[in-house]
Image (cartoon, rainbow, N blue to C red):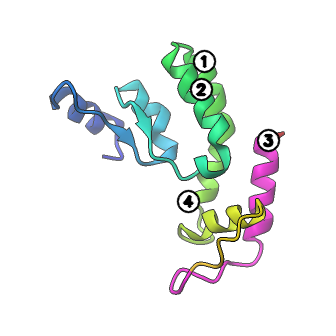
Amino acid sequence: AGNPGETAKVIRDAPQDFEVYSGDDALTLPLLSVGAVGVISVAAHWSAPEHVAMMDAWESGNADEAQRINKLLLESFDYETGDEAPNPVPTKAMMRTLGLDVGEPRLPMGPTPEGLEDKAREVYSRLKA
């Protein structure tokens, strides 16, 4: 729903075996807090270990650690949804900086704006520092 309050209502009103996953990386932790069980993530393409650690911390009851990791991931979330270009342009730029041959986005999405791959390298370096 893109809104933790609305998502909480969906979870409340859904059958017991109904599972909700975040589809927005930046909302993952807030949605976990209202009963979501996971995420379908874009940023996990380059930050899977951090996502796994955040989910593990949350599931083990360590909300402080989950919040700490979420803070590390915020720059990645901003990068993927930034004003420079719509997704999948930033994601493909990040994948290229990691050595994957994903090519350029097709029109009308591409080409990749100048400087976006440099920004990807900076985001990734800070995440892994």
Q: Nearer the viewer, residue 18 or 35?
A: 18
Q: Closer to us: mark 1 or mark 3?
A: 3
Q: Is residue 12 left or right of residue 72?
A: left
Q: Residue placed at 49% from the left, 19% from the top?
A: 59
In the depicted structure, whether residue 84 falls above or below residue 108: above
Question: Picture coordinates of residue 7 (x, y %)?
Answer: 29, 37
Mark 3, secondary structure of its residue? helix
Residue that numbered label 1 is attached to = 64
For the residues marked 2 and 4, what is the alpha-carbon distance in whole angstroms? 20 Å
Q: Residues within 10 Å of mark 1 (few under 14, many from 20)?
A: few
Q: Residue at x 67, y 50 (%)?
A: 46
| C-alpha gap between disc 1 and disc 3 | 20 Å
Badge number at residue 74: none
Q: Which residue is mark 2?
A: 67
Do residues under tags 2 and 4 come within 8 Å of each other at their CB atoms? no
Q: Nearer the viewer, residue 120 or 60?
A: 60
Query: How far, Cα to Cα, is label 2 from label 3?
Result: 17 Å
Determine contact: label 4, label 1, CB under 8 Å: no
Highlighted magenta segment, given as a residue range? 106-128
Query: In this rendering, would 62 be left or right of 12?
Result: right
3 or 4: mark nearer the eye: 3
Q: Secondary structure at mark 4?
A: loop
Q: Residue at x 59, y 62 (%)?
A: 82
Disc number placed over residue 128 in the picture, else none:
3
What amino acid is at disc 3?
A: Lys
Tell me the residue at 80%/66% (across/down). 118
> Looking at numbered disc 2 in the image, what kind of residue is underneath it?
Gln
**Secondary element at image label 2:** helix
Query: How far, Cα to Cα, is label 3 from label 4?
Result: 20 Å
